[in-house]
Amino acid sequence: MDRIPRIALLVLLAATHGCAPMERGSAAPAGSTGDDPPGPHPAAETTPPPTGEPASPSQVPGGDEARWESLLNGVRAQPRDCGGDPYAAAPPLRWDPRLGTAARGHSRDMATTRTLNHAGSDGRTPWDRIAAAGYEFSAVAENVAGGQPDARAAVESWIRSPGHCVNLMNPAFRDFGAAGERGSNGTMYWTLKLGASF
């Protein structure tokens, strides 16, 4: 069961004029394809693969910034259909080391606990982790996945899920951090943090 690819998403949009106190979101259970915190996210469902292929070598063990940029910006470089809603090509993302730190820490936590979840084993939320890394944000989103063998497969699973696809194609996001970690059970756990800073 641990080797079945799974995905989950979380998005949090704060007011663009400042960070207001955030509501605590519920964690996505293992095996879910997403939860619906604030934001326009359609219910997760299986959709046909989008046209076009992400541009990047498929073996990305997590932490290789240039390869992640190539992979994600290859996705954003062309228009996509996310669950029936069309999205124009989006501006390229740039690696942010603070988001990378937050993504790496959460992937390690999921790999250690062998759970696919937005909540950390210490109870921290995605925005807690991002804030702790020093990233001041007006908007952030988190996609997580488990069981995909490499980063390309994780990104492709997010593209096929409407809510995750919306996060990937959201033109408001300009920064990202991403990482993958292998659990003791051999399962890879992936985290993508997307953000817009003040």
Image: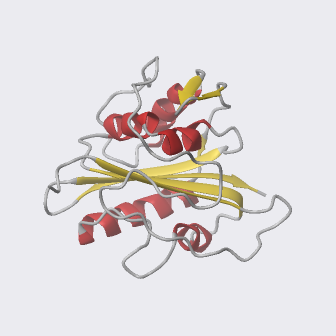
Along the line of sight, the residue nearer the viewer: 65 or 121: 121
Q: Position of residue 173 (x, y in %)?
A: 66, 45
Task: Quadrant for the N terminus, please.
Answer: bottom left
Along the line of sight, the residue nearer the viewer: 146 or 23: 23
Q: Position of residue 90 (x, y in %)?
A: 66, 30
| Residue at the limit of the structure toward the top, as seen here | 52
Q: Position of residue 77 (x, y in %)?
A: 59, 23
Q: Is residue 1 left or right of residue 179?
A: left
| Residue at the limit of the structure toward the bottom, as seen here | 122
Residue 179, compared with residue 115, is above or below; it is: above
Task: Report the residue at 46% width, 17% height from top.
Answer: 52
Q: Is residue 104 left or right of residue 21?
A: left
Residue 79, compared with residue 45, is above or below; it is: above
Task: Report the residue at 32% width, 36% height from top.
Answer: 153
Task: Quadrant for the C terminus, please.
Answer: bottom right
Along the line of sight, the residue nearer the viewer: 36 or 165: 36
Residue 24 quadrant: bottom right
Task: Report the residue at 36% width, 61% height from top.
Answer: 107
- Total number of numbered labels? 0
Task: Report the residue at 41% width, 60% height from top.
Answer: 104
Q: Is residue 72 left or right of residue 181?
A: right
Residue 4, compared with residue 157, is above or below; it is: below
Which of the colour schemes (rainbow, by chain, secondary structure, one colour) is used? secondary structure
Residue 119, compared with residue 74, is above or below; it is: below
Q: Position of residue 141 (x, y in %)?
A: 58, 54
